Image (cartoon, coloured by chain):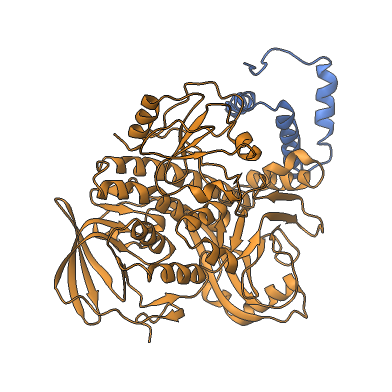
Amino acid sequence: MTRLITDPNLAAADDIYERLIAMHDGRSVEESLKLSARLNLILLNHIGDRAVAEEAIALAAQSRG
Amino acid sequence: MANVSNIPVWREIGATPPPVAQRETAPVVIVGAGPVGLAMALDLGRRGHRVVVLSQLDFVAAGSKAICFAKRSLDIFDRLGVGDAIVDKGVIWNVGKVFWGDREEPVFQFDMLPVKNQKRPGFINIQQYHVEDRLIAALETLPNVELRWGHRMSGLEQLPEGARAEVETAAGGYSIDADWVIACDGSRSAARDALGLDFEGRVFEDNFLIADVKMMGERPSERWFWFDPPFNPGQSALMHKQPDNVWRLDFQLGWNIDRAAAVKPENVDPLVRAMLGDDVAYEQEWYSVYTFQCRRMERFVHDRVIFAGDSAHLVSPFGARGCNGGMADVDNLGWKLDLILRGEAGADLLESYDAEAITIADENILNSSRSTDFMTPKSAASRIYRDAVLELASEVPFARPFVNSGRLSTAVALPESPLNTPDADDWTGGGVAPGWPALDAPIGDAWLLERLGRGFVLLADRDPGIAGIETIVAGADDDLLRARYALAPGAAYLIRPDSYVCARWHAPDEAAIRAALIRAKGN
């Protein structure tokens, strides 16, 4: 069974991170939230695995912020 | 003259005189003559039982109530002998379209009958009073069913082997000791109150305006739903065709509104014209504002009092799961109470009604709560996600299944039911698993579902020769039927009277079939 990958799995992490932040340049918090929502939905569909998606949501929800 | 003044009248019937005896007995008393109570009476009446129906009203009520009847309910109406009368009057539809903002193309579209070649369509729309009229006409042909109009149940108490209903009429009161009382008396159930029972759930803070209007002109008989349309900005709207050139228009209004003002024609008119055009010619049929709740009783069976329909469970209207959910209760309860009344099953069988009807109600509540949360987001993030889904749905296909304007009623599967015999054979080739409703298919010149519904039935590739069980053998040319049931040589299905599959085998022997039958009867 596929599980959520929690070890480093992405080459060029700095490049992707830069693209992710650049997406929000000049946006209000509300606009940014909508872009993040779009991205989350796109990625969840790409993952295409309910169990992995639920693990990812649970991990994200652990934030104490 | 109608006996209750604040409810609109569709058709006067007139009060039934009270019985001569002050105290009566009856095997079954049904409280309530809405579609659920009437269908329940028809189910038990057609099975030969004596049934008394108590209706507080002495007329058939008009007004905006259920209009969308799902395929499963139509299959049940067929079983009750009123399918054609109801479908012939209704407006058939299968397709729903969802629009967003001022975009002319739908962002999402669904088909309520993805599997074609079945007798009945995905849905029909028909006013509740037309359904009630047809159920009443069928009941009036049964000498063993008494419809009592203007008879209000004023009290209910449990007895050791039954329940006593106190009844009031304009011409005096009386009581009936019933072996069984079925409470089909709606969301404000007097039976539930009389027994002091719970009704837990969520109330949603939103108001919706129903404007049923009569207008001429051709528009498609599809369910059209809008999020944030230009004619009702920031809210939702719905348009749906009914018989007699009546259209159901539904506008979300928000929470803090003047409900009395909202239904005044001068306030409804701008909404109607904004939706349909300034020059539209229409007449008011019925306006009302509704709010809704999702809730259910903890149990539906309380000794000799059984709850069915809105008395037991309430949902928001967006999945058409209210009346259709009630019809599922009727379907589930009818054959079980029939077996109990005949002494062929113990009262324990009703535990399976409690379990199965609650499974169905929970699925209906879950779906209608989710639809409501999508339509009326409860947080800023929820609204932003909703809008992100709608935006993405207009751009890329993957997001369309997230769009939730109502997950419309279909038959609910009961895979966990204790009445099922789990598969012992390998059915990875397909078919219909135990706990799933039988899928319709052509058989000879007829339909499979037309041949189900009276008792337990074996659907078989070839006749296994089991005495005492009606057997339907698939014809050599019934390819679609054979494919839908993965009916390999020697295979057989056991199907319940409510058309649910409860067991299946590649090559059954008589002992296996008899054991499955005993299990399905709750023994």
Q: Quadrant of the N terminus of chain B?
A: bottom left
Q: Quadrant of residue B518?
A: top left
Q: Quadrant of the C terminus of chain B?
A: top left
Query: Which one of the lettered chains is coloured orange?
Result: B
Question: How many labels, in total?
Answer: 0
Q: Quadrant of residue B45?
A: bottom left
Q: Is residue B12 above or below residue B388?
A: below
In the shown orientation, is residue A45 left or right of residue B54? right
The image position of residue B459, as x and y in percent, is 50, 37
In the shown orientation, is residue B337 left or right of residue B208? left
The image position of residue B390, as x and y in percent, is 73, 48
The image position of residue B97, as x and y in percent, is 72, 55
At horizontal 75% and vertical 55% (from top left) the residue drawn is B100
At horizontal 24% and vertical 41% (from top left) the residue drawn is B346
- What color does chain A have in the rendering? blue
In the shown orientation, is residue B365 left or right of residue B158? right
Q: Quadrant of residue B148?
A: bottom left
- Name the one closer to the observer, B80 or B162: B80
